[in-house]
């Protein structure tokens, strides 16, 4: 019978070592992430308080239906040209409502967030061409605590930084969902580097087109 891996090794597999020096020294050598976690998992980040990674949370069929719906609605086409962002306020598309209903908010969010109705009323979808990233940022304060980020298509590494020096990274693969609240939402910036290829635990990952969907709740004074 195979022994389970120690919890600290699972954290390292998911979030990587804490410094570039550890990567360069080759202290940590791991197999593919999918060899460690082969089913849906809810992982609270050990350092970024309020950050929960929902691994493989969106099924491949659901991912395909979301991508088909976005393509059918022409979200990234407008005024005769391509655009990389689409926003919706108020009534969200049915697939976004279904996505929100799938989230393990009771485990990830405080009760006052998990129980609010509606949980989210604003959506932003971003389309990234190969090599594109997004500058480190904190979501606008017009949005309430409790944010969902779902990843589709290409994998990418997201970095979390605090006070310009602390840095934590994690690999987002298709179907992964991040839930942010508290410090993860307000104190840590998150962003993705612009590059053609990511390196994660000695594994090279070539970037392809990626889409992210962020669900948020607009504060009443901004509604």
Image (tube, rainbow, N blue to C red):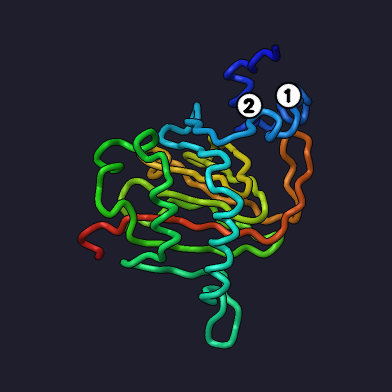
Name the residue that disc number 2 marks.
Answer: 12
For the point 55% across and 50% down, the residue is: 191
Which class describes the residues within 10 Å of circle 2: few (<14), some (14-19), or many (20+)? some
x and y, in percent, of residue 102 in the image? 43, 46
- Where is 136 relative to 11, above or below? below
In the rendered image, the residue lying farthest to the bottom is 80
Q: Is residue 99 left or right of residue 113?
A: right
- CB contact under 8 Å: marks 1 and 2: yes
Which class describes the residues within 10 Å of circle 1: few (<14), some (14-19), or many (20+)? some
For the point 47% across and 33% down, the residue is: 48
x and y, in percent, of residue 220 in the image? 21, 59
- Where is 222 relative to 27, above or below? below
The quarter in which the C terminus is drawn is bottom left
- Per the rendering, the mark at residue 82 is none
- Where is 85 relative to 139, above or below? below
Q: Foreground: 134 or 9? A: 9
Q: Is residue 17 left or right of residue 199?
A: left
Name the residue that disc number 1 marks.
Answer: 28
For the point 61% across and 28% down, the residue is: 18
For the point 44% across and 43% down, the residue is: 179
x and y, in percent, of residue 122 in the image? 36, 62
Q: Foreground: 36 or 182? A: 36
Ranked by sequence position, the earlier of labels 1 and 2 is 2
Q: How far apart, in angstroms, are the residues tagged by discs 1 and 2?
A: 8 Å
């Amino acid at each position: 019978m195979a022994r389970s891996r120690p919890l600290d090794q699972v954290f390292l597999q998911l979030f990587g070592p804490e410094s570039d020096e550890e990567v360069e020294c080759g202290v940590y050598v791991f197999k593919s992430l999918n060899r460690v976690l082969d089913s849906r998992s809810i992982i609270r980040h050990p350092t970024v308080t309020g950050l929960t990674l929902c691994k493989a949370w969106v099924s491949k069929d659901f991912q395909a239906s979301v991508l088909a719906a976005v393509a059918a609605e022409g979200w990234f086409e407008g005024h005769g040209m391509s655009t990389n962002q689409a926003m919706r306020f108020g009534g969200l598309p049915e697939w976004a409502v279904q996505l929100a209903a799938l989230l393990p908010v009771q485990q990830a969010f405080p009760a006052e967030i998990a129980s609010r109705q509606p949980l989210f009323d604003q959506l932003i979808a971003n389309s990234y061409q190969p090599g594109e990233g997004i500058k480190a940022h904190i979501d606008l304060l017009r949005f309430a605590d409790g944010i969902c980020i779902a990843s589709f298509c290409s994998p990418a590494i997201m970095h979390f930084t605090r006070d310009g020096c602390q840095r934590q990274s994690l690999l987002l693969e298709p179907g992964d969902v991040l839930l942010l609240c508290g410090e993860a939402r307000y104190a840590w910036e998150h962003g993705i580097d612009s590059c053609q290829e990511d390196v994660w635990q000695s594994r090279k990952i070539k970037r392809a087109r990626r889409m992210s969907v962020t669900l948020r709740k607009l504060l009443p004074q901004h509604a």
